[in-house]
Image: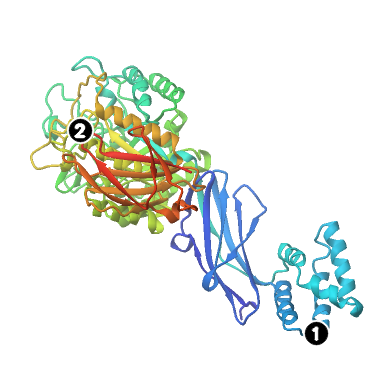
Amino acid sequence: MQNQKRVVVDYVSPHLNNGEFPIKRVVNEIVHVNAHVMADGHDVVAASVLYKHESKSKWNELRMHPGHDNEWNVSFTVKEQGYYSYKIEGWIDHALNWQHGISRKVEDNQYVSSELLEGVELIKTIINKVTKSERDYLKHLQKIFSDKESYKEAIAEAVSNKLHHIFYNYPVKQLINSSKKFQIYVDRLKARYSTWYEFFPRSASKKKGVHGTFKDCKRLLSRVAGMGFDTLYFPPIHPIGVVNRKGKNNSTEAFKGDVGSPWGIGSKLGGHKDIHPKLGTIDDFKSLVKKAKALHLEIAMDFALQVAPDHPWVKEHPQWFKWRPDGTVQYAENPPKKYQDILPLYFETKDYKNLWKETLDTFMYWIDCGINIFRVDNPHTKPFYFWNWIISEIKKKHPDVLFLAEAFTDPKIMQQLAKQGFTQSYTYFTWRNSKHELIGYVEELTKTDQREFMRPNFWPNTPDINPFHLQGANVSKYIQQYALAATLSSNVGIYGPVFEYMINDSLPNREEYLDSEKFQIAHYDWNIKNDLITMITKINKIRQKEEALQQTNNIKFCHIENDNLMAFYKWNDDKTSELIIIISLDPYHTQHGSMQLPLSDLKVIDPGRPVQVYDYISGNSYNWYDEWNYIELQPDLPLHIFKINK
């Protein structure tokens, strides 16, 4: 037989998989909690959310607010990194129920002397919990509630707001019912807002044909920081395998001087805890990390859990690989792609505990070297619960560490990786090109439960992806793509300098770069300045200034009468930063149309007062007097970022 309960607590949100996984937030972010709380009959129901950080023993309590049809809500702010727990409590509030009942009877001119005596008993249950002044007041009420000569004063006090506040603030929770506990994982702000730049360290040399070093990378840090990026991501920096090394353009035959793919990790020179000798030493790397931090840049490291055939693990731990009957190991494949220079790890090995431990030790080694951000290569080809364990173990000691999942795969698999602990996720943005596709995708990410755990990172290009719409594209198209990525998502990244130099030659009918830098050293003039660099820098600086662009979920698309124009409203939680962003999707022609302002969201109180806006892109200010406003964008300046000034 169940305990006696009358209150039902149902449909608590937000939560994931009925509490199997934590929802995600960053420090000082708000959690909006909703629940269905109800009881039989007509008694007054009350509800609270209780929440606490994992380091605290005492729960914080906030009373929930009743809404339509037994839906209750309240919000709280998470202020520390780490895990929070929260739950909902519901109860019949007999004191408030008494006051509600006696108020109705007094309004009906009924005589309520008996009800007043019930009030005396209710006061007894809380009189030792209140402040001294409140206690004096309650003692006075007990006296007049029992005195027929004070009836007029008694009924006035019985229905008073003062007594209501005391009953509300000191509830007696009888027959209380509680939901299960749910969890929140709170990261630092960079989990939600980051601006990534990727380049290959071996291509950083000033001299053509010369392998770049970490010292060369140091020279480029100010360029990256000056463009407004805060995260510098390097492909793998480890020794590269010689056995089955790939040649230029992914050729299966490597010739003398071919440097191979950085993702073919390991040789006689070392493995995942070692550095390619031509890049420098571990001290050179630590020095680079330190200088980057001085420029407010963090180095993000690629973690590719795979090996070249001559990686030390192959001899030291042969049980970590699946051997075929003929004594060979199946190389990695992702049909139709083949990776003859890479061996996959065998996660069903009986020695899996040592494999897991070595992986964790490798992460910890680089964390000790100053790395707090990892871009994880192909995590969807390793067990989900392996990543849950790895990330959980790291977060226990190093809560600042962040993980970006590089998994262009099925949506539910990408979502599962996010649930299991990955901080950010690559997305399908790279292939979303039309207004309909973009709006649909962003609505999916921000208006479903994905908003609670999936932090999208929008990349217009990567070393693996040279999208068809950028092949042969003009500067306007590149500006549009970066503007879309950097304003729709608060996490954004580009592979450069290929992107800003608009290098887009491709393999025939393939979304792959011709002469791919994955298989050879490239040489760049890092001093080039152009309009695209100027615009990228401007957009990044706006992102730094406007909190509306430092989050993804607060977005509302505005109606605009042109399918080649996209308009949307973004804001931060307290609406101290509000923007209207309009981007042309046509890189060749002038586009115009009428845009409908979201007046109700802007909370325009005086219809006669204009909405004042400042365009960060052109530097011009405007007064919008009407709900509908004319917009015109030309290819050489294909966007507006309007700041709303109230």
Judged left or right of residue 267, residue 325 is left
How far apart are labels 1 and 2 at the CA level?
82 Å
Q: Amino acid at mark 1?
A: Tyr
Mark found first going from the N terminus, 1 or 2: 1
**Helix or strand or loop: what does disc 2 sit on?**
helix
x, y percent for residue 543: 40, 36
Number of labelled discs?
Answer: 2
Q: For the residue carrying disc 2, how many other residues have a C-alpha within 10 Å: few (<14), some (14-19), or many (20+)?
A: many
Residue 306 seen in render: no
For image coordinates 54% across by 43% down, the residue present is: 81
Q: Identify the disc placed on residue 111.
A: 1
How far across and down, in percent of the image, does residue 461 sit? 24, 38
Furthest residue toward top = 207
Q: Position of residue 120 (x, y in %)?
A: 84, 74
**Residue at the far bottom in the pictured view:** 110
In the picture, residue 449 is in which quadrant?
Answer: bottom left
Residue position marked by numbered label 2 in the rendering: 475
Name the colouring of the figure.
rainbow
Q: Residues within 10 Å of mark 1 (few under 14, many from 20)?
A: few
Relative to 334, 583 lies left or right: right
**Vertical comparison of 47 with 469: above or below:** below
Nearest the camera: 358 or 372? 372
Quick one: quadrant of the N terminus? bottom right
Disc number at residue 498? none
| Residue plotted at (19% across, 16% down) | 208
Q: Is residue 222 left or right of residue 518?
A: right
Q: Which element is circle 1 on?
A: loop
499 lies above or below 147: above
**Is 253 situated above or below 511?**
above
